[in-house]
């Protein structure tokens, strides 16, 4: 079944043709080291800026998924077209950065949040050299990346900012798009229920919290975007398939309700029959919805999106 994880969900390698070519009509800055951390690999990002931009371009920061266990900045989710996200952003007149971050076997939470915020700070620091607008930055992610995008947008606690990379600029963003994210780790069902019969894999949530600074139950709360809901949150778009068994649609619904209760600007789209990674559907449709949402905010004179 497309909504079940099997034992071979983690690819052993990627063939050469899996590498993503730069999007068309873009100036490419590849392999920028946004953070160097003692004892870890250098953390890198790729940035693509519209080649025909006449002014600093608004920026979207893409955060890949992979259960915080696998994935890479150049690796598209599922069977998506490799450049769907990046080319769509460039065609809409927005720059797009795609980032790597430490996986859960490299470092426990909140390292992944620290890394994502560090990438935003780096891009804001060097915005003049890179041709991007430091005041118009959004985050967008899918699955584990959607979870991190929600945290980047919502968390404004100095204790969770981290000291990775550039630290003298803020990490706030103007908008966030989250595809099928975990938003409340406490309410997540057992991971084993999502697996195909006979498959045994460790829980991604247990893995990311192993060695975290908090006891397990507190770690669940600390990693949950619903814990950081605030009235002044940036506009957020959540898109989630109603047939998603890996991350139930109730996760996005719960965050949307919490944001609505404080009158924050949130938009929730649930899609009947759609599985995780938008299996059984057309990802291009939902990427297009996200691009429209981001362009309306980042390219408008004001961050207001209008009616909910």
Image (cartoon, rainbow, N blue to C red):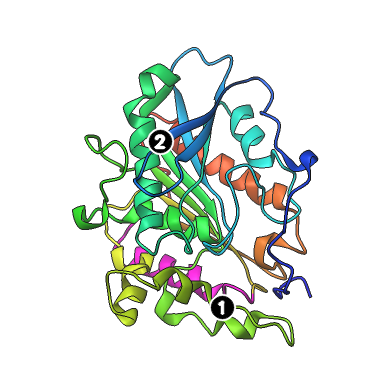
Quarter of the image where one finds residue 78:
bottom right
- Disc 2: which residue: 34
Asked whether residue 308 is in view, the answer is: no
**Quadrant assignment, res 111:** bottom left
Q: Which residue is mark 1?
A: 202
Q: Nearer the viewer, residue 142 or 135?
A: 142
Of the numbered discs 1 and 2, the one sitting upstream in the chain is 2
Residue 81 against residue 143 in the figure, above or below: above
Q: Are marks 1 and 2 in contact (CB under 8 Å)?
A: no
Find numbered disc 2 in the image and state the secondary structure of the residue it sits on: strand
Circle 1 Cα neighbour tier, 10 Å, few/some/many (<14 / 14–19 / ≥20): few
* Stretch of the chain drawn in magenta: 245-266
Could you tell whether 198 is left or right of 65 in the image? right
Q: Quadrant of the C terminus?
A: bottom left
Identify which residue is drawn at 69% across, 69% down. Answer: 272
Q: Secondary structure at mark 1?
A: loop
| Residue 217 on image: x %, y % | 33, 82
User: Image height check: is 135 above or below 239?
Assistant: above
Give above or below for 166 relative to 215.
Answer: above
Nearest to the observer: residue 168 or residue 228: 168
Residue 216 visible in the shown view: yes
């Amino acid at each position: 079944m497309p909504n079940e994880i099997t034992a071979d969900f983690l690819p052993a390698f990627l063939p050469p043709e899996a590498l993503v070519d730069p999007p068309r009509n873009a100036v490419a800055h590849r392999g920028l080291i946004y953070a160097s951390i003692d004892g870890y690999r250098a953390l890198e990002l790729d940035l693509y800026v519209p080649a025909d931009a006449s002014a600093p371009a608004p920026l979207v920061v893409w955060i890949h998924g992979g259960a915080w266990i696998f994935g890479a900045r150049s690796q598209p989710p599922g069977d998506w077209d490799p450049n769907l996200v990046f080319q769509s952003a460039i065609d809409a007149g927005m720059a797009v950065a795609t980032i790597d971050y430490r996986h859960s076997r490299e470092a426990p939470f909140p390292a992944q949040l620290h890394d994502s915020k560090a990438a935003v700070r780096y891009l804001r620091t060097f915005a003049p050299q890179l041709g991007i607008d430091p005041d118009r930055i959004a985050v967008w992610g899918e699955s584990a990346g959607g979870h991190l995008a929600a945290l980047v947008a919502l968390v404004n606690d100095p204790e969770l900012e981290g000291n990775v990379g550039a630290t003298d600029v803020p990490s706030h963003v103007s908008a966030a798009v989250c595809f099928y994210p975990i938003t409340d780790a406490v309410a997540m069902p057992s991971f084993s229920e999502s697996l195909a019969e006979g498959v045994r894999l460790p829980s991604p949530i247990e893995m990311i919290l192993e060695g975290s600074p908090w006891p397990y139950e507190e770690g669940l709360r600390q990693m949950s975007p619903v814990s950081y809901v605030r009235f002044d949150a940036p506009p957020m778009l959540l898109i989630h398939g109603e047939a998603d068994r890996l991350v139930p649609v109730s996760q996005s619904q719960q965050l949307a309700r919490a944001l609505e209760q404080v009158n924050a600007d949130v938009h929730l789209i649930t899609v009947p029959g759609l599985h995780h990674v938008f299996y059984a559907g057309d990802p291009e449709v939902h990427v297009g919805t996200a691009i429209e949402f981001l362009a309306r905010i980042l390219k408008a004179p004001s961050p207001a999106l209008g009616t909910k």
